[in-house]
Image (cartoon, grey):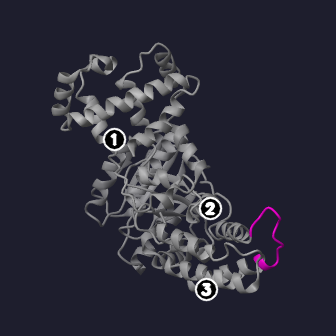
Amino acid sequence: MFNNLTEKLEKALHVLKGHGKITEVNVAETLKEVRKALLDADVNYKIASDFTKLVKEKALGQNVLTTLQPSQLLVKIVKDELTELMGGETAGINLSGTPTVILMSGLQGSGKTTFSGKLANFLKTKKAKNVLLVGCDIYRPAAIKQLQIVGEQVGVDVYVELENKNPVEIALNALKHAKSNGKNVVIIDTAGRLAVDELMMKEISDIHKAVKPHETLFVVDSMTGQDAVNTAKSFNDVLNFDGVILTKLDGDTRGGAAISIKSVVNKPIKFIGTGEKMDAIEVFHPNRMADRILGMGDVISLVERAQEQYNEEEARKISKKIAKNQFGFDDFLTQIQQIKKMGNMKDLMGMIPGAGKMMKDVDIDDNAFKNIEAIIHSMTPTERSTPTLIDGNRKTRIAKGSGTTVQDVNQLMKQFDQMSKMMKMMQGGGAKNMMNMMKGMGR
């Protein structure tokens, strides 16, 4: 995400490298390029101008510490100010109320219905909530069906009234249904339009007044830049919403919406969507996003994702198998599945400091493990548990069955053998270290 902005900011801040001290001249030259980078990312002109003025004042008002180069100091100041510009602190979601009512708003095509499902999945799996999705889009023919499909994917009930054309009535009836069926969170998906109009605003305002939501969230397509910010302002004037959801941050996003929306509507970004899958949702952390924008990675988020997939009991079993020399391809396959659940490979690489820059021109296929999985699935259970049985004839059969070559099978066998030996040598590390090595193998 934000690859273009990151590259331009890195070039701008590179201007100060080699300088022994910060001066008004070299700071002005650097910040001129920073402002250009922000404007190219579709950040509002006044916000970009005010931002660079503030950074300049802080840079010239500080003495460079003996352990800090001028360029490092300016990067720190830019990072701190970017963090503040995007909200400063991480904003939580209000889950008070029985049930908690969350009203989703936004234009058609912003990803509102899909994100309603992602949020339902997040609250169900991370917060142990019993969620009800409510379909109040009575205009778009496929909207109700889409919500039902999304609900089925995440295992959450969906309340709809196919014959009712009054969204306020549907919402109120859904609340009654939620209370009588033990639901503690209700997410109401409302209708969107292709543009802001009077009818749309009146309708969502009426729903808002009727259900009195604990959280009103505005969903915005981050790829639309300043248009997203302007739309957010229109919705906020009517709804006074509580927070912003940025979707499609895994696409060709310039970054303008993420950077400037908080200062325009004075409402925090609460979540971001980073892919098509139902678990592609992240809590928005301004400081971590500032790190990503400046090419510093996001190790904390990477570790959190790994911890979510890391199973201590499974790790103990694998350690015992390694000790007894019983580690096989079924165990290998299990670890691949854990890595895949962490997210797409390019996004994960971007969280490693410096790796995003090195990999920017490299096409990392999300199906990096596809051939490995196909080869393993073509093995018999006995072959997977006892890899030493696999001879030349078996390799030929496995290659044909997996649509690969004998060379591919040999390569996997060699990598597996090397990894098994290394695993035995570092016995104490267990599955955590194996996951790190497998990332390299996947690439």
Region of the chain picked out in magenta, as a range: 59-69
Tell me residue 288's x, y (percent).
61, 57
Mark carried by residue 221: none
The residue carrying mark 3 is 46
Say which of marks 2 and 1 sits in front.
1
Residue kind at label 3, given as amino acid type: Lys
Assign the magenta stretch its main secondary structure. Answer: loop
Q: What x and y, as percent, mark residue 399? A: 19, 32
| Residue 248 pos. (x, y %) | 42, 62
Give the number of callouts: 3
Observer-nearest residue: 377 or 49?
377
Considering only order in the chain, which callout, 2 or 3, is on the residue closer to the N terminus?
3
Query: What residue is at 59 percent from the left and 74 percent from the top?
Result: 265
Q: CA distance from mark 3 to mark 1?
A: 46 Å
Amino acid bearing label 2: Pro
* Residue at horizontal 38 percent and vertical 69 percent from the top: 192
Mark earlier in primary sequence (2, 1) = 2
